[in-house]
Amino acid sequence: MRNRLWDFRYTTIDLEDLDVSVEFVHPRSQARVTVKFRVDESALEGRARDLKGRIELIAREQLLSLAASLQKTGALNASD
C-alpha cells in the first residue's frame, strides 16, 4: 500500500464570498501548503459533504500540478 504523501489539515469554505482554503500537511516533514481559490455559486448546490469532497479534490489536483511543475524545473526532488 502506498503511503499518503499529504494529509488534509483543514478545509474552510466562506459561503458569503465563495472563497475556499484547504491546508495540507506533509506527515514526515510537517511542511504545510495552503491552496486558496474561489468557487462558482453553482458549486454550493447539493450536500455540504459533497461540496467539501469536490473542493478537496480540486485542491489536491492543484497541489499535484504545483509539485509536477516544481519537479520539472528541478526545484523539487522526488525524495521531498
Image: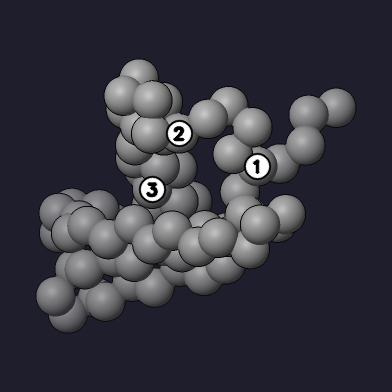
Q: Secondary structure at mark 1?
A: loop
Q: Amino acid at mark 1?
A: Leu
Mark 3 vs 2: CB contact within 8 A: no
Closer to the eye: label 3 or 2: 2
Number of numbered discs present? 3
Could you tell me if residue 58 is visible in this image?
A: yes
Secondary structure of the residue carrying tag 3 is helix
Nearest the viewer among 73 and 34 is: 73
Dividing the picture into quadrants, the one containing residue 31 is: bottom right
The x and y percentages for residue 65 are 35, 31
- As drawn, is 65 to the left or to the right of 6? left
Residue denoted by label 1: 5
- Judged from this view, the residue extending furthest toward the top is 72
Q: How many other residues sit within 10 Å of disc 1, few (<14), some (14-19) or many (≥20)? A: few
Q: Position of residue 32 (x, y in %)?
A: 50, 62
Q: Is residue 47 visible?
A: no
Q: Report the residue marked by disc 2.
A: 76
50 relative to 65, above or below: below
Image position of 78 with respect to 52: above or below = above
The CA distance from mark 2 to mark 1 is: 14 Å
Tell me the crowding category of disc 2: few under 14, some 14 to 19, or many 20 or more residues within 10 angstroms, Cα based. few
Disc ID at residue 49: none
Residue at the spot 58% in from the left edge and 27% down from the top edge: 78
Q: Position of residue 12 (x, y in %)?
A: 39, 73
Q: Earlier in the sequence, mark 1 or mark 3?
A: 1
Q: Which numbered disc, 2 or 1, marks the residue closer to the eye? A: 2
Q: Amino acid at mark 3?
A: Ala
Q: Residue at 45%, 34% (x, y): give it.
A: 76
Q: Looking at this view, is 80 or 49 the one in front?
A: 80
Residue found 35% across the figure and 20% down from its top: 72
How far apart marks 3 and 2 lie (CA) works out to 19 Å
Residue holding disc 3: 59
